[in-house]
Amino acid sequence: MVARIRNLGDGDEPGHTPSWIDSLPIITKYWFGSTLVITLLANFGVIPVYHLMWNFELIKTQFQLWRFLTPFLFVGGFSFPTAITLMLLYQYSSQYEKSSVYNTGAGGGTADYATMLLFGIASTLLSICFIELTPFYCKNMVYYVLYVWSKRNPTEQASIWGIAVGAAMLPFAVLGINVIMGNPWLEIVHGMAMGHLYYFLVDVVPQVYNKDYLHTPDFLINFFGTGEYIAPAPAQTTTTNGGQRPLGAVGSGGLGGRSGGGGGGYNWGSGGQTLGSQ
């Protein structure tokens, strides 16, 4: 359905062959992993779907704070559109987080991606006051990410069922296919609208109006560091018999990170990955 990503594990340490989930950047790994698990558990009846949906009254009266998060982690019932949404999340969230799509104060990468997602969540929860949407917003967020990525990488190539499509047209092509197939499309349009708002604020407004409204908060920079987040490596200490054993991670991941050696440095952004039309 969508383009395959080549060299997904680029940037891994030499000699280390991570699993497919470990090769993902940190936000994508937890978002995709949590979404996959919660969607499966809900479809198998382990978790009632009712407990996952957005319901502000229950948040306010019964303090069910998990409902701020779970609507963004449940895709839907077992279906072809659900599978496609999971594929898009896996591919384009990873592409976005790794490629420093927009720098809003942290050099691109993880902290800026977290800011972009928080903006999308806030925009979604505000917009439902004016637009009647389903009480689940994972699809909206996935198409939000896809749209912003496509605006920043318009010349990349993707393929849909073997047909080459420029990245700038990819969200519209996916929307058109869903409309033709009779699948729900409002979530896609809503996600694209949020994506265009974000793109307008971080790309158009600074250039045209010389104003800069969106900035990555300091607490995200302190936590994730600058560029793509890399978890601190376990420190080594010499034992009495001359061997080495790990002491565990040293320091906070986001404070004064550097690329390269040392425990827990940061990659300062690696550029976008090329999509191959296959």
Image (cartoon, rainbow, N blue to C red):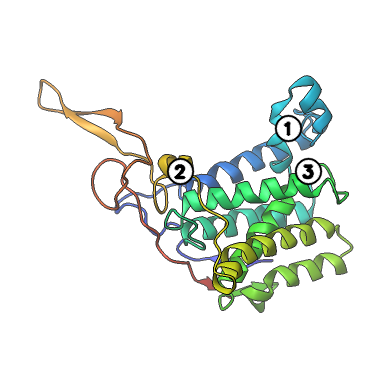
**The C terminus: image quadrant:** bottom right
For the residue marked with disc 1, what is the amino acid?
A: Arg
- Identify residue type, mark 3: Phe
Marks 1/3: CA–CA distance: 10 Å
Q: Is residue 57 above or below residue 204?
A: above
When asked about the image quadrant of residue 35, the answer is top right
Disc ID at residue 87: none
| Element type at mark 1 | helix
Name the N-terminal-most of marks 1 and 3.
1
Distance from label 3 to label 2 (Cα)? 30 Å
Residue designated by label 2: 218
| Residue position marked by numbered label 3 in the rendering | 136
Residue 88 x %, y %: 65, 58
Question: Which quadrant holds the N terminus?
Answer: bottom right
Name the mark nearer the viewer: 2 or 1.
2
The x and y percentages for residue 107 are 42, 57
Q: Which residue is mark 1?
A: 67
At horizontal 31% and vertical 42% (from top left) the residue drawn is: 264
Q: What is the spatial separation of the Cα atoms under label 2 and label 1, in whole angstroms?
A: 26 Å
Towards the viewer: 130 or 85: 130
Q: What residue do we see at 53% from left, 52% from top?
A: 113
